[in-house]
Amino acid sequence: MYIYDSTLRDGTQCEGISFTVLDKIKIAKKLDRLGVDYIEAGNPGSNPKDLEFFKEAKKVCFKHAKLTAFGSTRRANVPVLEDKNIQALLDAETPAVAIFGKIWDFHVTDIIRTTLGENLHMIYDTVEYMKSKDKEVIFDAEHFFDGYEANKEYALKVLKTAVEAGTDWLVLCDTNGGTFPSEIGGTVSYISSLFDVPIGIHCHNDCDMAVANSIIAVENGAVQVQGTFNGYGERCGNANLTTIIPNLQLKQGRRCISEGHMIDLTDVSRYISELANLSHDSHMPYVGNSAFAHKGGMHIDAIIKNPRSFEHIYPELIGNQRRILMSEVAGRSTILSKIQKVAPWVTKYSEETQKVIDRLKQLEYDGYQFEGAESSLELMIIRALGMQKTFFDVKDFKVICEDHWESEYNASAVIKVAVDGVDEITAADGDGPINALDKALRKGLEIFYPQLKSIRLTDYKVRVLDTSYATASKVRVHIETTNGKVTWGTVGVSSNIIEASWNALVDSIEYFLYHDDKLNTIQN
């Protein structure tokens, strides 16, 4: 199987994503190390950023992947030698180029407004020209399945034209994402039988079937799969390679990337989410934080006895991990497994275990929920067992909110912290009281713990627990924090939203410092 990644082109068309040139270089290096075969990195004829990327990419030595520039056929009635976009593709100096051409007669006549015959000439001239320049040509048959349904004869004529011009690949595109697997399978099988040129598949996810369509295309003859990491893309996104790769390789035995790099799949997925500045989808198959999370007591009991009971693969294969969620439906064995992560000597029916159970029940009664906030749970266990280490002591803080809401900052915070008997007073402005507190606390602690500069908040959620008390209701605040490699969640509950936020914020920093100190102790 050949894996063709389009995260740096199709993925950037996702609402909310805007990679810098440096971001794209970093992602391309990650994808190359992972072992994808093609990296479609942008359209050099469409915008200055992509031009700049290809200029910088020339300085990078790609060990496995072929960098690919993307662009259209020549324009209607413009000689290929005079088309600026074609020249931009050559200037990118990539070993491969992806050329998309119109398959659907409706698009030819009503969208680019030319004749069916001229469209064929545009495709032939462009592919032939690129082959004369020693480029590997991937012909993307845009809107293929819609065009094939509307005018089968013309769609086949377009593919034949690209083949006669010398294309190395025919990629069948479900550009509108509206085709069903039953249609994809039969069509790909038929097209594969007509041409000696290898077939690729490119699916969009508008009917939530892009992965299924890609898999069934492979089962019917496609040997190249195009998609994006995390399914990023325009509208509903593209086929998700983080699902397709393990599906094909682990389930069907089709080699997509080297086995030694399959363990890096989750890391690369989360890395790209981080650079995209989007929350990583916790419910994604394989790489999501919840993909191997278990909550029900009976399920947990079975998982502890044998993971195969409720897991279709071992999460370690793709670099993920199993998570046992804490809730009111979890049993003593589940709680013990959490305790033993920090205190291996504690037994199932010991006083320590009962103490943690009682504390957990009380906190849940108060409104705490530790699903997604396992870091606060771990700190609670450490504190309940008297194992905590004091990294800092907040002696006092004050928050001031002003009424000029339209200004950049409308809140200020002053905090006095002590570390090893040394006091530090800091102040910071923020966009709201929580942001001001966060900035002031970090500002003071970074003097003693410079490693805190590597962490940042990625998510902040507030939920009202009992609306009957109106503005006096208790709230539960969930904070998600990351250092770019690991993400952890913490929780706070109070009828005072600032206090709830503060507790979750302090937990997020203490959790990081606890594990950083633990790591340093092991290394020393």
Image: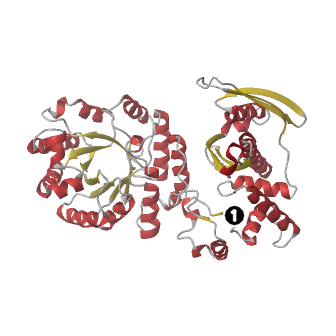
Residue where numbered disc 1 is placed:
327
The percent coordinates of residue 408 (x first, y second) are: 60, 24
367 vs 359, left or right, is: left
Query: Which image quadrant is residue 407 in?
Result: top right
Q: Is residue 379 above or below residue 498?
A: below
- The correct choice, above or below, for 181 with respect to 510 in the image is below
**Identity of the residue drawn at 58% across and 56% down:** 289
Q: Position of residue 157 (x, y in %)?
A: 12, 53
Kindly state the secondary structure of the residue where label 1 is placed: loop
Toward the viewer: 434 or 87?
434
> Colour scheme in the image?
secondary structure
**Visible in this render: residue 264?**
no
- Give the side of residue 71 with respect to residue 20, left or right: left
Q: Residues within 10 Å of mark 1 (few under 14, many from 20)?
A: some
**Could you say which is closer to the camera, residue 277 or residue 396?**
396
At a point 39% along the width and 58% down the height, the residue shown is 208
**In the drawing, does residue 203 fall left or right of residue 101?**
right
Give the residue type that dot 1 points to: Ser
Seen at 43% across and 48% down, the residue is 232
How many marks do you count on the picture?
A: 1
The picture places residue 348, in percent across and down from the top left corner, at 81, 72
Image quarter of the N terminus: bottom left
- Rendering quarter of residue 366: bottom right
Q: Measuring from the top left, give residue 502's x and y in whole percent.
A: 74, 41
Residue 145 visible in the snapshot:
yes
199 shown above or below 513: below
Q: Nearer the viewer, residue 61 or 13?
A: 13
